[in-house]
Amino acid sequence: MEWSVRLTQQYLVDVIVPYEYRSEAFLPTELFSIWLLLATGGVFFYFFFASLSYFVSFVWNKEQYYPQTLKQNLDDQISVETGIAFRNLPIMAIFFVPFLYGTIHGYSRMYYNVDDYGWGYLLASIPFFFFFTDFMIYWNHRILHQGLIYKYIHKPHHTYRFTTPYSSHAFHFLDGWGQGVPYYIFCFLFPFHHVLFMASFIFVNMWTISIHDQIDFTGQLDFVNSTDHHTVHHVDFNYNYGQYFTLWDRLGGSYKTSYQTHDFVTGAKLNIDKLLNRMGRKEREEILAERS
């Protein structure tokens, strides 16, 4: 983690900050470096990989993967979604600065030597990490759907009932922070190898993008909170709050079944009529008229 902050300071901060304030020991400079890393990294990662997902699935393989529930022209939707993300990701980064600062300075339980806890613990910590964070995100997400919290914080993420890859990070900054902070909390409570933390950061962001593209290859794995499970959440609102698994939704009475949209091997479209039936009459008529 430290190397990424130092690279940010060397190649970005030193260009902006006056010479006399560039010392790594100068706290404001270090905090600014951490914020700049989180803000620029978050924006770049979101836009690059959401765009990659969009062009691969919605443009280059449009006939096979373009969701039946979306209009052909997505310019307005993408403009709104990216606007929400670009405005909020840099602010969200401010709230993560203390956690990354504490991690870098040894206040967390992140470790760097596998021998400290052994390979057995390292491997076991992976499913434990996802089990623990999924539990926290489930309840955070469920709380976000309550009354004024939903109206003022979570509603921007539900601007559209049918999502695109760009919907993935279109959060109010407090919403994104609430659903992202469990990953840091885990590292402050339990030993977690620094390489696993970096790998999980990449995976979590890729997963978040993938569950918003409406392309589901794994619907038959009913214990996994697959893409269509999350599509159900956006369409029906009060179901499928989980991030990775369906366990907490089943225990919490908020589970609703999903449909696999594409065959895992051939990529063939599945359950088209069932997916279209989720739409309101007006929505469906508009989509069908546009494609006729």
Image (cartoon, helix red, strand yellow):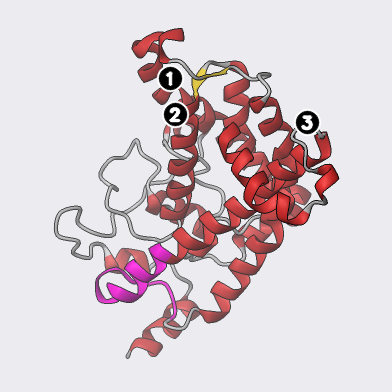
Q: Are marks 3 and 1 in contact (CB under 8 Å)?
A: no
Left or right, 45 with reference to 275:
right
Label 1 vs 2, first from the N-terminus: 1
> Magenta segment: does it hold 100?
no
Q: Position of residue 44 (x, y in %)?
A: 55, 58
Q: What residue type is labelled 2?
A: Leu
Label 3 belongs to which residue? 25
Quarter occupied by the C terminus:
bottom left
Q: Specify start and end residues of the magenta stretch as a single range.
A: 52-71
Disc ID at residue 196: 2
Q: Are marks 1 and 2 in contact (CB under 8 Å)?
A: yes
Give the class, few, some or many, for how many residues have Cα within 10 Å of label 1's Cα (few <14, many ≥20): some
In the rendered image, the vertical position of residue 129 relative to residue 143, given as above or below: above
Q: Which amino acid does label 1 sit on?
A: Ser
Which is closer to the viewer, label 1 or label 2? 2
Q: Which amino acid does label 3 sit on?
A: Ala
Q: Do the residues labelled 3 and 2 touch (CB within 8 Å)?
A: no
Q: How far apart are marks 1 and 2 (CA)?
A: 9 Å
At mark 3, the secondary structure is: loop
Residue drawn 68% across the image and 47% down it: 175
Q: Position of residue 243 (x, y in %)?
A: 48, 41
Give the class, few, some or many, for how many residues have Cα within 10 Å of label 3's Cα (few <14, many ≥20): few
